[in-house]
Image (cartoon, rainbow, N blue to C red):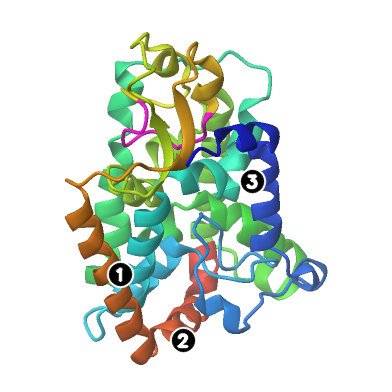
């Protein structure tokens, strides 16, 4: 099912903007400098969006994943693992290209007129960093040191969307600012600088959530695909892509669809992928596993755990306290 033509008419930028608004539609939070703590915080949005943002009405999947792992010694994180599995299976890195507000921010930063870093074998190699950060900061530190490592020490989204706005609006929080907050502000400024010169630098080199979704690229149900019957193998798609792809829809492809406008034979489109009988058994296993994990998680109050753990750790993740 081809929907590429519709996406050309309905700009990806509009989808990103609408997504950002929907993720952060708690207008009262921006006015009062408070965090929404309603029941919807037990649900994860697909993209990177800080739980502690004053406007956020749901939780960040990466933050929820880490907070669940913090207590994994006592309770297996069924709910969040099932949620990530389901989102990755259905959309893969389409989430990065269309449904991630921080990805959109990076694209705006890259529009600032400066010399740009061109992709190369070196930048392709640097993409491996995000997998290292995933293992060390998003998995190992939460499990062995009981801290949301990536959120606490690195995540620029938490600093930009939550730490800075909330400390600006709440005087009592300013008294809690310490070295960690200063470190995260410096790191945020560094990442902003990188993104000005390198297209989606955080997304390409640092983001563990993108690393997680990249594992699902080969089996995701929806995304960019190539009509092999039309393709003339000119590689115009790869040459013009700003990401470090070797081919359309590899692990570095964010499914943005920009390659469609560069294909001379209109062989690329976005839509529901053709049925691949070789992949069907694995896809079926993933679906069943995801449903089981979510159901078990809900029965073990995993939905409420996401909300309660995130509330307890939100200031820590902002680098405050």
Give the number of the mark in front: 2 or 3.
3
**110 left or right, relative to 121:** right
> Do callouts 2 and 3 mark residues in contact (Cβ within 8 Å)?
no
- Residue beneath label 2, please? 304
Q: Check disc 3: other Cα within 10 Å, few if <14, some if 14-19, many if 20+.
A: many
Magenta-highlighted residues: 248-257
Position above or below: 231 against 252: above
Q: Nearer the viewer, residue 108 or 144?
A: 108
Which is nearer the N-term, disc 2 or disc 3? 3
Give the number of the mark in front: 1 or 2.
1
What residue do we see at 68% from left, 18% from top? 113
Whole-percent x, y for residue 50 in the image: 56, 61
Q: CA distance from mark 1 to mark 2?
A: 18 Å
- Residue beneath label 3, please? 16
Give the number of the mark in front: 3 or 1.
1
- Residue beneath label 1, please? 290
**2 left or right, relative to 278:** right
Whole-percent x, y for residue 249 in the image: 36, 33
Q: Main secondary structure of the magenta part?
A: loop
Q: Check disc 1: other Cα within 10 Å, few if <14, some if 14-19, many if 20+.
A: many
Which is nearer the N-term, disc 1 or disc 2? 1
What residue do we see at 48% from left, 17% from top? 117
Q: CA distance from mark 3 to mark 1?
A: 26 Å
Whole-percent x, y for residue 286 in the image: 25, 62
């Amino acid at each position: 099912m081809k929907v590429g033509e519709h996406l050309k008419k309905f700009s990806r930028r509009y989808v990103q903007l609408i997504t950002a608004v929907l993720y952060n539609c708690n207008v009262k939070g921006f006015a009062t400098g408070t965090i929404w703590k309603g029941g919807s915080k037990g649900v994860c949005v697909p993209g990177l969006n800080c739980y502690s943002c004053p406007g956020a009405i749901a939780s960040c999947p990466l933050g929820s994943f880490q907070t669940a792992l913090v207590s994994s010694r006592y309770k297996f994180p069924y709910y969040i693992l099932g949620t990530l599995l389901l989102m990755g299976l259905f959309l893969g890195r389409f989430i990065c290209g269309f449904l991630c507000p921080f990805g959109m921010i990076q694209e705006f930063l890259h529009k600032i007129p400066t010399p740009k870093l061109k992709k190369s074998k070196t930048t392709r190699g640097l993409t491996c960093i995000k997998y290292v950060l995933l293992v060390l900061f998003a998995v190992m530190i939460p499990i062995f040191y009981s801290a949301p490592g990536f959120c606490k020490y690195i995540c620029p989204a938490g600093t930009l969307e939550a730490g800075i706005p909330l400390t600006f609006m709440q005087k009592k929080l300013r008294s809690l600012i310490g070295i960690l907050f200063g470190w995260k502000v410096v790191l945020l400024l560094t990442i902003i600088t990188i993104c000005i010169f390198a297209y989606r630098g955080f997304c390409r080199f640092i983001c563990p959530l993108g690393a997680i979704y990249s594992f699902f690229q080969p089996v995701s149900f929806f995304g960019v695909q190539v009509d092999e019957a039309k393709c003339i193998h000119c590689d115009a798609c790869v040459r013009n892509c700003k990401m470090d792809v070797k081919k359309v829809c590899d692990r570095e492809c964010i499914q943005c669809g920009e390659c469609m406008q560069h294909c001379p034979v209109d062989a690329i489109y976005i839509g529901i992928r053709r049925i691949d009988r070789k992949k069907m058994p694995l896809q079926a296993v993933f679906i069943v596993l995801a449903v089981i994990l979510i159901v078990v998680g809900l029965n073990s109050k995993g939905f409420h755990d996401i909300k309660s753990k995130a509330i307890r750790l939100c200031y820590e993740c902002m680098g405050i306290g």
